[in-house]
């Protein structure tokens, strides 16, 4: 059975953890808890406490954020009649974790770069931050661009709040254009709340690994640079 590692990245509060929880449990979490890198419990501190070692500093800190609400998840799934062991990795989008987050990237088979359809800032950060970061560490790993919170794009209150800031929700054509710009395999939209389009996101992530574009024949697994 083929194992596939899927890492989810994007700005904080765009709904990455909700996406994963909803997909794996069929339940939408009620409270937002910022994700702390779940790789910390799996990492060992060096022998001597170092002022320059992020793991040492975090491991010895009394003010660590709360543990992540989504643990890395592995399950056997069937896509197009093929059995796959799918590993899902949540990440923290906050700048405080910019140095540690890439430690989750080695051996990644596919990335989901997420943004909120009702957060133009998170959409811009796909271009400004997430695509450059992913490509720096994993130049050949396939990317799927995911617009989250689809249920809010037509929500009147949400639209009104954006309008007050002279902003509008991200449209499907805008997302499609961004996907083309960054060379994403697919552009998909979903709602973790209603689960609309949710299963498709992960099915397509698996297909991106099982059936990569024929022109790209190089090894596609991510290595830490």
Image: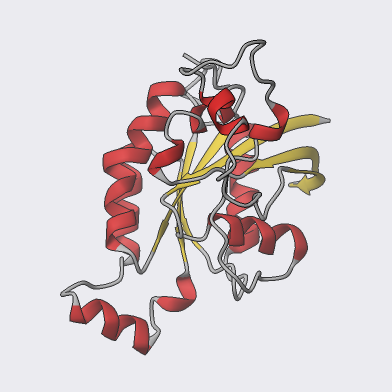
Question: In the image as oriented, which residue stretches furthest toward the left?
Answer: 166
**Which residue is pictured at 68% across the width and 52% down the height?**
70
The correct choice, above or below, for 148 with respect to 83 in the image is below
The correct choice, above or below, for 152 with respect to 191 in the image is below
The image shows residue 59 at horizontal and vertical percentages of 62, 31
The correct choice, above or below, for 165 with respect to 83 in the image is below
Q: Is residue 38 visible?
A: yes
Classify residue 154 by image quadrant: bottom left
Instruction: Describe residue 84's horizontal placement relative to residue 89 as left or right.
Output: right
**Which residue is pictured at 62% across the width and 70% down the height?**
195
Q: Is residue 139 visible?
A: no
The image shows residue 220 at horizontal and vertical percentages of 54, 22
Q: How is the image coloured?
A: secondary structure
The image shows residue 185 at horizontal and vertical percentages of 46, 40
Quadrant of image for the N terminus: top right
Question: In the image as oriented, which residue stretches furthest toward the front?
Answer: 62
Question: In the image as oriented, which residue stretches furthest toward the top?
Answer: 47
State the residue in front, 57 or 170: 57
Classify residue 89 by image quadrant: top right
The total number of labels drawn is 0
The correct choice, above or below, for 8 with respect to 23 in the image is above
The image shows residue 119 at horizontal and vertical percentages of 33, 64
**Which residue is pictured at 57% across the width and 36% down the height?**
61
């Amino acid at each position: 059975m083929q194992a596939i590692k899927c890492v989810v990245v994007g700005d904080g509060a765009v709904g990455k953890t909700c996406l994963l929880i909803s997909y794996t449990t069929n339940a939408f979490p009620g409270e937002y808890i910022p994700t702390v890198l779940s790789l910390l419990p799996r990492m060992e501190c060096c022998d001597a406490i170092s002022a320059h070692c992020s793991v040492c500093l975090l491991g010895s800190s009394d003010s660590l954020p709360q543990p992540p609400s989504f643990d890395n998840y592995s399950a056997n799934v069937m896509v197009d009649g093929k059995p796959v062991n799918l590993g899902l990795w949540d990440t923290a989008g906050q700048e405080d974790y910019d140095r540690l987050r890439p430690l989750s990237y080695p051996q990644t088979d596919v990335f989901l770069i997420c943004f909120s359809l009702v957060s133009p800032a998170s959409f811009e950060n796909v271009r400004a931050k997430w695509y450059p970061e992913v490509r720096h560490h994993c130049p050949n790993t396939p990317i799927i661009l995911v617009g989250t919170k689809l249920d809010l794009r037509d929500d009147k209150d949400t639209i009104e709040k954006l309008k007050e800031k002279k902003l509008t929700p991200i449209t499907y054509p805008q997302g499609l254009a961004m996907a083309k710009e960054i060379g994403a395999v697919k552009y998909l939209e979903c709602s973790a709340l209603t689960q609309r389009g949710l299963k498709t996101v992960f099915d397509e992530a698996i297909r991106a690994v099982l059936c990569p574009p024929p022109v790209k024949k190089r090894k596609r697994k991510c290595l830490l640079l």
